[in-house]
Amino acid sequence: MLHKPEQFIIVAATAEGRYGLTAFDAALLKAGIGDVNLVRLSSILPPGCREANCIEFPRGAFVPTAYGAYCSEQAGELIAAAIGIGFAPDGSGVIMEHAGTCSAAEAHRKVEQMLEEAFANRNRELQKVQVKSVEHRVEERAGAVFAGVALW
């Protein structure tokens, strides 16, 4: 049986930890999706999918999520993640993400550019763009950035 998501939420967070993976875990917790199993998606938002303000997923649930994440153990390094949705007039969308060693503004711009190209590749009109970005300067041991779109 195929499932078409009806709702989505855009989340983003940063965190520090003793290790890259624990920093990533802490960022997921701050974003509100730390006690679930992320099932990584590619890039399509189905028509009619509505944005939610918040959701509490059952612990351990499988949550389809398109995301960008980056971890660094280099003190002082600036890292960022951005996620964006480009919307067509029919309400369908394309999701793009970027994460790496850059500022939030740079990640935001890159996501916007990728959305423009994705719509051009499809010969479809890009009506609206929604982007969320975060940045973090690694303090001591490890830092992580996360930006994602969860769909259910």
Image (cartoon, grey):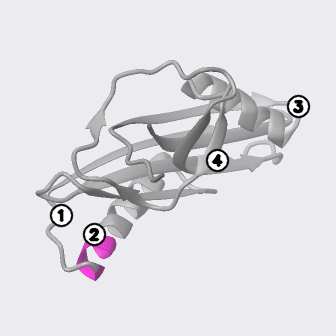
Going from N to C along the chain, the mark reached first, 1 or 2, is 2
User: Which of the two discs, 3 and 1, sits closer to the camera?
Assistant: 1
43 versus 131 height, above or below: below
Residue at mark 1 to residue at mark 2: CA–CA distance: 7 Å
User: Which of the two discs, 2 and 4, sits closer to the camera?
Assistant: 2
121 versus 26 height, above or below: below
Type of the residue with mark 3 = Arg
Type of the residue with mark 4 = Leu
Q: Quadrant of residue 76?
A: top right
Secondary element at image label 4 = strand
Secondary element at image label 3 = loop
Residue at mark 3 to residue at mark 1: CA–CA distance: 42 Å
Secondary element at image label 1 = loop
Between 135 and 132, which is closer to the camera in this rendering? 132
The residue tagged 2 is 116
54 versus 67 height, above or below: above
Residue 117 x/y as whole percent: 31, 75
Q: Quadrant of residue 102?
A: bottom right
The residue tagged 3 is 18
Going from N to C along the chain, the mark reached first, 4 or 1, is 4
The residue tagged 1 is 126
Left or right: 94, with 43 as reference point: left
The residue tagged 4 is 78
- Residue at image coords 59%, 41%: 146
